[in-house]
Amino acid sequence: MNVRWLGWAGLEIEADGAAVVIDPLADPGATFAALGERAQEVQLPAVVAPEAQGTAVAGLVSHLHRDHTDAGALSVALADDASVHEPAWPGGADFENLALAQANAELESEGLRRRTVEIWESLELGPFTVTALPAVDGLGDPQVSWVVEADGQRVLHLGDTVFHGYWWRMVQRHGPFDVVFAPINGAVVNFPHLQPPSPLAAAMEPEQAAVAAEALGAGTLVPMHYGGFEIDPWYLPLPGPIGRFEAATADRSYDTRVLKAGESFEPAAAPFPATS
């Protein structure tokens, strides 16, 4: 298995000549396009395109926020018969779903095949077994974490979840996890449909990611979802996330890797038996 970080929350996993992509992002500038001229102030994260061009067997998205569901990136990467796998639509009024509307409309416009998944649902996609695991979105929107298994190894992608209490159930049912990709930017948000705003982080902080990886029995923890999108007052990531990550993960039971966008590696198998 080869794992390639695409920048931000994007991931590409290859095995046996096939690939899946998770949350690829080709056009980060579109994320805050609704802000008009203010969007030009946003520092954009560094991202790269998946190496799979029209050949990926599946696109997995953790949730329908525009920085995690880029229909253009998915359309370029996916094979003609491949689908985008996503959490179920939450229902409710349009105003409740403002954060989902852009990505949803772009997926429809691209004409991509779409399939909703339930928590704990597993799918066989080419050489991969993929399973939707629990996640808790900081905005209250539907979100899943994806575990991808191939070649006897498991890679867990945590989207931009907040800290929650499903970690132990996740590892008991689907661990061990050879690699865990975890968000670390601890962003505080202040969006019009979420008033009054919360002062608490809407994605994990580095210290929370360090604890989550311990609970998950991770072999290697890789930080993601940092390095861009700050715009006052709507989206405020914490400063110095990598320094805090390195301090929080020192002397842990797992290894860590800090990757550059486009960098890949082959995971080492975790030194403990799989659960059933």
Image (cartoon, rainbow, N blue to C red):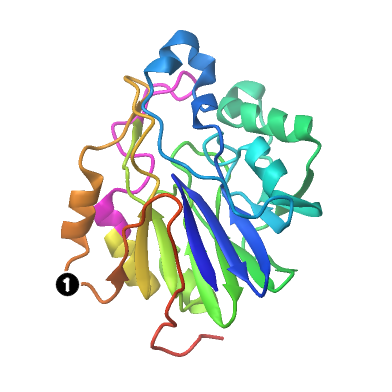
In the rendering, at what x and y percent does residue 5 appear? 46, 55
Question: Residue lying farthest top?
Answer: 37
Residue at screen point 29% across, 48% down: 205
Residue at screen point 36% across, 27% down: 43
Q: What stretch is highlighted in magenta?
A: 189-209
Residue at screen point 50% across, 32% down: 28
Q: In which quarter of the image is residue 122?
A: bottom right
The reply to whether residue 88 is visible in this rendering is: no
Mark 1, other Cα within 10 Å: few <14 / some 14–19 / many ≥20: few
Q: Which residue in the protein does label 1 denote?
A: 251
- The quarter of the image holding the C terminus is bottom right
Q: Quick check: 55 left or right of 258?
A: right
The foreground one among 37 and 194 is 37
Residue 83 sits above or below residue 139 on the image: below
Residue 55 sits above or below residue 98 on the image: below
Q: How many labels does the image show?
A: 1
In the rendering, at what x and y percent does residue 233 appear? 33, 19
The reply to whether residue 116 is visible in this rendering is: yes
Q: Quick check: 68 left or right of 130?
A: left
In the rendering, at what x and y percent does residue 154 appear? 52, 74
Q: Quadrant of residue 268?
A: bottom left
In reply to whether residue 204 is colored magenta, the answer given is: yes
Question: Residue lying farthest bottom?
Answer: 273
